[in-house]
Amino acid sequence: VRTPWLRCRIVTATRKLLHSADHLTRRRAARALAEIPGHAITDGLFTLVEHGHEASPAVCDALAAAGDAQTAARLLELLERRTIQCSTAIAGALGGLHHEPATPILSRLLDNPGVAEPDAAALVRALGRLDDRAAGPTVLRLLRASSATAPLLHRACAEALATLGTPS
């Protein structure tokens, strides 16, 4: 849309959809906004992620789908500053972007003993998607430690190791 006033109205209406109670609506709105060129729109999406908005997972997915190296660098910067709840969405986006510099940060997050099993599994899946063999030792350690006590994490570790090509 090249007409400025029309573009502004469309963007404003779409931003409102990010506050919808329906997660599918939030996901579609985030995807639409992420595909619109312009730093102001992208900056607004990053602000939502930075503040832990309920649309953060959808926004992270949309940024990853439309992203590039600059998007990955900004997400990595946010990952270093966020809590674990928001980090899983950012980690998933970084995995989708195959941004290998995220490997040590994700590994460090997994070293936190207070990480809940679903969050740890999401972080491990992101490590697998990064396809960085440097993640192998961390994932292998978690696989050995999680066998019977954390089946969700155990499965995520096995899948990540299969992707990484690391012997289990």
Image (cartoon, grey):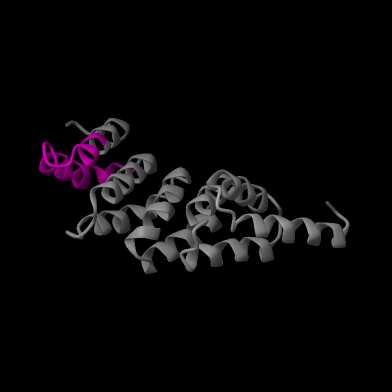
Does residue 54 belong to the magenta stretch? Answer: no
Can you give x and y, in whole percent of width and height, for residue 125 in the image?
Answer: 33, 42
Residue at far front of view: 21
Hey, which quadrant is residue 10 in on the image? bottom right
Residue placed most toward the observer, 150 or 133: 150
> Observer-nearest residue: 103 or 9?
9
Q: Where is residue 46 in the image (x, y as percent from the top left)?
A: 55, 63
Picture coordinates of residue 167, whole percent (x, y): 19, 31
Identify the residue at horizontal 61%, vertical 65% (top origin): 44
Measured as percent of width and height from the top left, residue 74 is found at 50, 62
Q: In which quarter of the image is the C terminus?
A: top left
Extent of the magenta region: 132-155
Can you say whether 139 is above or below 85 in the image?
above
What's the residue at 48%, 68% (across, down)?
A: 51
Rendered view: 159 above or below 130: above
* Residue 3 relative to residue 56: left or right: right
